[in-house]
Amino acid sequence: MSESDRPTIALNVEGVNYARAWADEHRVLRGRCPMAWSTELGGYWVATRYEDILAIAQNDGLFTSGKTVDPATGAIEGGIAIPPMPIPRVVPDETDRAEWKGFRDLLNPRLGPRMAESFRARARSFADALIDRVIERGEMDLVQDLTSPLTALVTMELVGFPLVEWRAFADPLHQLVYMDKSSPEFPAAVAAMDALQQRISEAIEENRANPGDHLIGYLVQGEIDGAPIGDADLHGMIFNILSGGVDTTTALTSNALVYLWRHPDKRAALVADRSLLTAAREEFIRFFSPVHGTARTARAETRIGDQTLAPGERVMLLWAAANRDPAFFDRPDELDIGRSPNRHVGFGAGIHRCIGSFLARMMFEEMVNTVFDRLPDYDVREALARPYPTVSPINGWIDIPISFTPGPRLSAVDPDWIEGR
C-alpha cells in the first residue's frame, strides 16, 4: 500500500501538544482511523483500539520487539521505543521469543509475588525514613522526596547496588525518559546515562569475582541452555530491571496522589477503607497508563483492522488508548476506584507483559498508605507542579511540591543513604 492510500496523520508522540491532550487525540483516532500512519519520527503506524493492540502484542511471531545497534555507527533498528533510545538493547524487553524465553525463565523466580512481599516491610521503612526527613518542616516534593527515591531504593536493594548511590541512578533515568530528544540538555542526560551504564558493567565484573546475595549475584551465576550469560545480556537485564523499577512506579504513584488531592471524596473513601486500595490501584494503572506506549516491528505483510502493514514497518501500541477504549470499558474516561472487572493493559500484554508488576503494585501500596498515615492533609501546590513535557514512553511528573501539617519523626537518626551521596 502506498502512503497516499493510507489514513495519514502527523502525530508526534513526543510532542508537547500531544502530551497535554493525548486522551482526546486517542478518542478521535479510535473513532475515525484506529490504525493510522503518522509521518512524524521517521514514519510509524499508530494503534489505538484495544483489540488491535492486543492482537499485535500477542502475535510475537509476526511482530518483533528485537533491537539491534550498529557498533560502528550507533544506528538502531527495531526495539520498543519510537523514537529509539540511544542505549543498548534492554533484556528481555527488546528480544524475541527464541531468546526471550531463556531470559524470562531465569528472571521469573526472582521477580514474582513472593519476592515482592518479601520487600514490603523494607519499602515501608524506606517510606518512613524519607517522610521523617521532611515531616517537621511541613513541605516537600512528592516526586523528589518520596516517589522517586523510594522506587530507586527498593529496586537498587533488589538488584544489588549500594543504597547511597540511588540518586546517581534515579536522576538520569528520569531525565532520559522525559526529555525531548532534540532538547539542548538531552546530550548531558545521555552522558549521565553512560556513567550509569559503566557502573552496571563494574558491578557485573565485581560479582563475577565475588557473587553477592542479590539479583546481580544470581544472574552472573546463571546459565541459559547450559551456557553462561554474556556481559552484554547481563547488562541489558540489569538495566531493564532498574529502568522499569525506577520510573514507571514513580509515575503511577505521583499521578494517583495528585488525583486524590483533586478528589478529596475518593481520598477519604480510601483512607477509611484500605481494602478498596487494591481495586483503586488497578484503576489508576488503567486510567493513567504510566507506560504510555511501546513499539513493535512487522516481520511480514499483515492486515490489522482495515489496514495493511508492510514488512519492516513500525507500529506504536498505545496502551493508554487501549485502556480508554469504550468497547472494553464502561465510562472509560471516568476514574472509578471500584471498577471491576478491569481488564486493563497498563502492564502491557503478550510475552513482554511487565515482569516487575508485582513489585510495582507493592511499592505503590506502601507509598500511598504512608502518605495517608503521615501526611493526611497534604495540599498540592498545583501551579508549581510540573508534569513530564512528553508522555512517551512514560506519563509522569518532574516534581510535585506539596504542603501539610508538620508532624513528628519516627526516628531521630537519618540513615546514611538519605541524601543519595
Image (cartoon, rainbow, N blue to C red):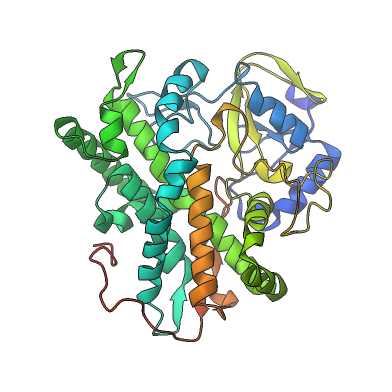
Q: Of residues 48 and 180, which is closer to you in this image? A: 48
Q: Residue 92, relative to residue 161: is it above or below?
A: above
Query: Which quarter of the image is occupied by the C terminus?
Result: bottom left
Residue at x 36%, y 46% (from the top left corner): 190
Residue under the point 67% across and 74% down: 268
Give the vertical position of 166 relative to 271 (above or below): above
Quarter of the image for residue 314 reads: top right
In the image, farthest residue toward the left = 209
Residue 188: x and y in percent read: 34, 51
The total of numbered circles placed on residues is 0
Would you say 312 lies left or right of 153 here?
Answer: right
**Is residue 218 rendered to the left or right of residue 338?**
left
Residue 197 image position (x, y, % from top left)? 30, 40
Q: Nearer the viewer, residue 232 or 183?
A: 232
Residue 409 lies, with reference to residue 76, above or below; the image says: below
Can residue 180 be seen in the rendering of this structure? no
Q: Does 245 appear above or below 110?
A: below
Q: Which residue is located at x 38 percent, y 49 percent?
A: 155
Quarter of the figure that contains the N terminus: top right
Position of residue 86 measured from the top left corner of the image (x, y, whole percent): 41, 37
Position of 333 with respect to 269 (left or right) is right
Give the side of residue 101 with respect to residue 265, left or right. Answer: left
Whether residue 97 can be seen here = yes
Between residue 244 and residue 180, name the one nearer to us: 244
**Residue 328: where, in percent of width, then height?**
80, 41
Picture quadrant where residue 417 is located: bottom left
